[in-house]
Image (cartoon, grey):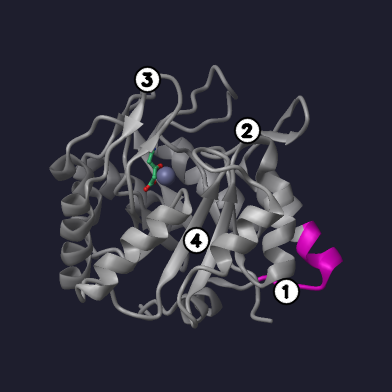
Amino acid sequence: MEKLVITAAICGAEVTKENNSAVPYTVEEIAKEAKFAYDAGASVIHLHVREDDGTPTQSKERFQKCIDAILKLCPDAIIQPSTGGAVGMSDLERLQSTEVTPTPEFATLDCGTLNFGGDEIFVNSDNTIFNFAKIMKDRGIKPELEVFDKGMIDIAMKADKKGLLVRPLHFDFVLGVQMTATVRDLSFMAGSIPEGSTWTVSGIGRHEFEMAAAGIIMGGHVRVGFEDNLYIEKGVPAKNNGELVEKVVKLANLLGREIAKPDEARRILGLKSR
Ligand code: KMH
Ligand code: ZN
């Protein structure tokens, strides 16, 4: 089995300091959280950014500042900017995170519209998805295909059929938002992608570590972090993102799976070496 690639989703666009006081907002806080995660074993930093007051933003300038600050502390980390941003943002606003220098090697590509809780709907029409895929292909950015249910794998395959994706594909199965997060669901998703693709699992909320353990055993990769879950165990807020990553490293050690360093992760995920 390949070594395990751990992604840390350190911030997200929805969680706040009211949920866990360690959720980072400022450039310094974001860089510090990335460093905790990187030191603990994360090779990929999935990045959202905030204004100092916590408001989510896709501002190119803010992304640039955060990326520069993270790379100062973690020079070989793989930074994966979000093109999802926050519910309600326009496509142009969302794409700004890919306009930084150097051009990102990796970025998210959300593959469908979904219910995001309450009245929130995260809108990704087919044309948005195809347009984002084309722009990423033209800029040489590998998309991580964010799929929240099986239908989104099918939409990603439409983009593939149109020649908008470059194989091998990489998927992130985000389970516990629109689709439930069980081992049966994860096996179904992993069995529904093209041969030779790689995948990560992000279990949301209390499902984070169950899905991590399943992903480790099944040969997938794992994402954890405040974007997905704020607790190290039931009722106990995590001190920082590093603590969440450490728990995955412990699980991987117990289960006999080694952890990939960033350059090994680049090879495993088919990213261009920098
Ligand atoms: N914040 C969600 C609306 C992504 O990063 O691409 C979108 C999201 C997915 O988090
Ligand atoms: Zn995200």
Q: Which residue is mark 4?
A: 44
Q: Which residue is mark 2?
A: 230
Quarter of the picture containing the C terminus is: bottom left
If the picture is divided into quarters, which one holds ligand 1?
top left
The magenta span reads: 250-259
Q: How far is the residue under mark 2 from the one under mark 4?
A: 19 Å
Q: Which residue is mark 1?
A: 258
Q: Is mark 1 within 8 Å of ligand 2?
A: no
The answer to whether residue 258 is magenta is yes
Residue 268 visible in the picture: yes
Q: How far is the residue under mark 1 from the one under mark 3?
A: 41 Å
Residue 246 visible in the picture: no
Upstream in the sequence, badge 1 or badge 3? 3
Q: Which residue is mark 3?
A: 119
Upstream in the sequence, badge 3 or badge 4? 4
Upstream in the sequence, badge 2 or badge 1? 2
**Residue at the spot 62% in from the left edge and 73% down from the top edge:** 260
Name the element at disc 4: strand
Q: Are marks 1 and 4 in contact (CB under 8 Å)?
A: no
Upstream in the sequence, badge 2 or badge 3? 3
Upstream in the sequence, badge 1 or badge 4? 4
Name the element at disc 1: loop
Q: Is mark 4 within 8 Å of ligand 2?
A: no
